[in-house]
Image (cartoon, coloured by chain):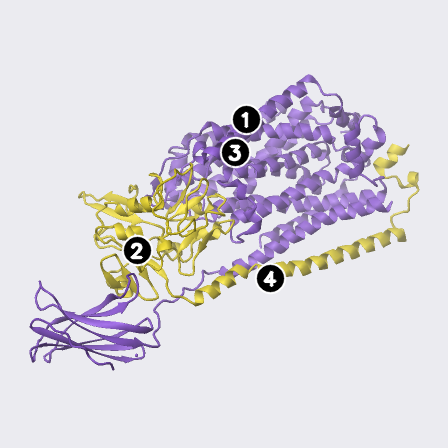
Amino acid sequence: MITTADPIQAAIRPFRKASVNFWIAIGVLSAIVLVGIFAWVIQLRVGMGAAGYTDRSFWAIYIADVVAFIGVSYGGAVVSAILLITGVSWRAPLARLSEGMAVVTVLIGAALIVPHLGRPDRLMNMFLQPNFKSPVFWDFVAITTYMLASFVFFLVPLIPDMAILLEEHPNELGKRRTTLYKFLSKGWIGSNKQHKTLHGAITILAILIIPLAVSVHSVLSWAFSLVSRPGWHESIWAPYFVIAALYSGVALVIIVTAAFRRGYHLEEFIHERHFIRLGFLMAALGATYLYLTFADILPGAYLGERGVSQVVFDTIAGKFAISFWLFIIAGGVAPIILVALPQTRNIWGIVIASVLVVIALWLKRLVMVIETAHYDRLTQSFGDYYHFTWIPIAITLAATAAIPLLLMLLFRVFPILAINEIQEAESEEEALQASKSTSMAMKASVGALILVAAVSAISIVGATPSVAAQDNISLTAITSGAKVTLTATVLNGTVPVVDAPVDFYESTKMFKPGTNPIPLGRELTDLNGIASLTYTSVVNGPKNVSVTYYADVEGEPAIASTNIDINGAISPYEERAPKLLAGAGQVLVKVLFTLVFIVFVTVIAQIVRLRRVMRLQ
Amino acid sequence: MLSEGVKRGNRKDLGLTPAGDPCVEEADLSRRNMLYGLGALGVASMSGALGLINYSEEAQAVATDSLEHQWCRVIDLRACTGERKCVSSCQTRHGLPPEQTWMRVLSWQDEVGKEFFMPVPCQMCENPPCLDVCPVSSTFRTPEGIVLVDQETCIGSRACMAACPYEARYFNWSKPAETNRMPAPSPNTPEFPKNQLGTVGKCVLCADRMPYTNELPSCVDACPNGVHYIGDFVTDVAVNGRKTVKLSTFLSENNAVRFKEELGTNPRTYYILGNGQPLGGPEGAVK
């Protein structure tokens, strides 16, 4: 379908003098964000206890928020990147909005890590003393990399649009926009070579952003599944998170598109068919998410193993049953029905389905986090679980309000429609060159698959007789290396005492000032009144060996001792072999760093090559 | 129309060279050369940077070669009567709020009403899961086997709390009250940490008292029944404040077991059962 409306006029409309409604909306949204920041300041002063956290709910709402917000960011990447490399021409009017949403939500999601931390003032330690074994560190790397790529992916397609606007409406842009546009699009004349380079750069960025978004959601899930907590320690969690991200992301794209379509009068470019197609995509992802939810729950529930089965039971039939089934119905079944029924398959129906999906998936993440966190692995029961206070609610609402706020501000600076892409899509439709784009898309998809595969790929001594009341005891020690033979003789006058229990000791300098005797064992004297014990000393150096004998149950023991010097003793302590696969972990770290480096170089290279063709002209 | 040219890149309108033109090829070549150069530079700097990654682990390996002590714990459950003196003395010594206990004493009853107790401090694992997940390397293991937290670098991500299978970590959710810390033998060190808002605390095995020749850990000192032993694998001795035993013999003769051995954490805390109780207790044992 070819639109006769001018995308330039529609894109430039938000730059003009804004209506009172616009400023009211900005004011209200800013106020909500300010309340959230105020709540965070209070939390900083009072402590995270004020946000309802306890040792049994150490992770709760903020981490769920992080997952939810960074999750929806992926939706922007999908609608734009996947649809681009698969050559879907109807994406053009949605491209700028979804790319903008991806940038805005990943920024808010990353910012939500700050209230989650006990000491956000030390965030720099992530750079200063990173631990490469930590999934949280890799979260940080993945989010940073994805943020850079999504930012560049938003900016690059803007270049021709800015040039077009500078060319056609120089007077309507205003001073600041003109300066910014001139700086960013300097040298763009729209030659064939420039267009070719631009297409190449956008395609590479689109291919790159898919495995990057997959990596972000996988690593986010590994912050949970790399610990041995029941419910979190699940191999399915990485793809489960990726699908959840896509699902909620497409839903938010629908909501944002519907809101801006109405508020910014883009009805001529974005039609019901756009919503229906996105709705189908959302329904397919919803069905996949329901399937993965079942696959996640079944193994734990089937085996009945303590821990996992308790968590599953508590989720589907215990404290969290209402939330869980609410999610299944409102976040899974209802949206699919709304999209499936022809009566509700319209903009309103699909937007309602999308709102249900976004809210239900946030709830699902909250349940996933709180449920397992409050399971106490010592008592094997549930501790007190998370209680909401106004602080985290204010912060979550602030983050939510920040989405439209930042988007409204963003589209006051940059054109809301991808002018160039819409025009190209139109001309493509005119020429019906569908076959050509498929082959490029094929190459691009193969490239994406290869990248995804690459990512998923680390011492005789004299005796000293001692005096006893009646019985007397003497001790001799013979050392041979670390082997010591102690021989005690118990005599009553000159008569050997038979079957007398004799206790042998060796001194240690440990755990007491001076010497501390370690019991070595008890032996009975033979017919000659002799008892002996052989042991291996474990510590080198001079020491005292002693022997005691209690003639009576009460009363002082007969004691004899002697000094020895041990050489060549070997401690029984042996270091344990390192964890299996510890070496593989080290290799993995190097591989991952190399991949991250390649991604950075590739992203930056796209800017460099564009700047080059823009300078050459 | 110029705008058309800008939009479509119309070659004819602007009089530009066609795609196959040598000038364009040249630009392509130089771009390629530059990218190769960038790549080569990257590979060089990358291999340099990757060489640094092993640094901390190699340093640790050197440190463990000169071992004097390897601390461990033995908890004799036969003697425990659940007085929880270990817990209170620890809280006093470390200035902990009432809800924060660096050692928990689980208790439960069997069908006959017999009570069982089980003190659970940090198990001082040899493969501590809490250490691996700390994003900022604030949790570390001393060469003598004590797992500690640097209160001055902890960012409070609580990843360690998620990872610890013994739930032995505690977060300072509110501002710790200025408590009468025992006469400070040391300033604020990981061995004798000062609690601060927003960081994670845990049992330090009174590491500031090492090598325990003058004073034993407070829980060991406080127990009236001699339940807690502090031991050393190297010199093969353990004491509970009144009795000294040969560690290896003591463990084997009493069939000492470790808690959650199947997790591969290699805990350095041994339990001596003997009252017929299961380790960890039944579902729903209380703190």
Percent x, y for residue B56? 52, 59
Residue sitting at 35 percent across and 60 percent down? B211
For mark 2, what is the residue?
A: B216
Does the rendering let one see residue A337? no
Mark 3 vs mark 1, CA separation in Å: 25 Å
The residue under label 3 is: A361
Report the front residue among B199 and A149: B199
Rendered image: mark on residue A96: none
Q: In the rendering, what colour is chain B? A: yellow
Q: In this view, does B279 lie to the left or right of A65?
A: left
Number of residues whose C-alpha sits closer than 10 Å to that of mark 4, classed few (under 14), some (14–19) or many (20 or more): few
Q: Are marks 2 and 4 on the same chain?
A: yes
State the residue position of label 1. Answer: A35
Work out whether disc 2 and disc 3 sit on a shared chain. no
For mark 4, name the chain: B
Q: Which amino acid does label 1 sit on?
A: Val
Give the Cα distance between marks 2 and 4: 42 Å
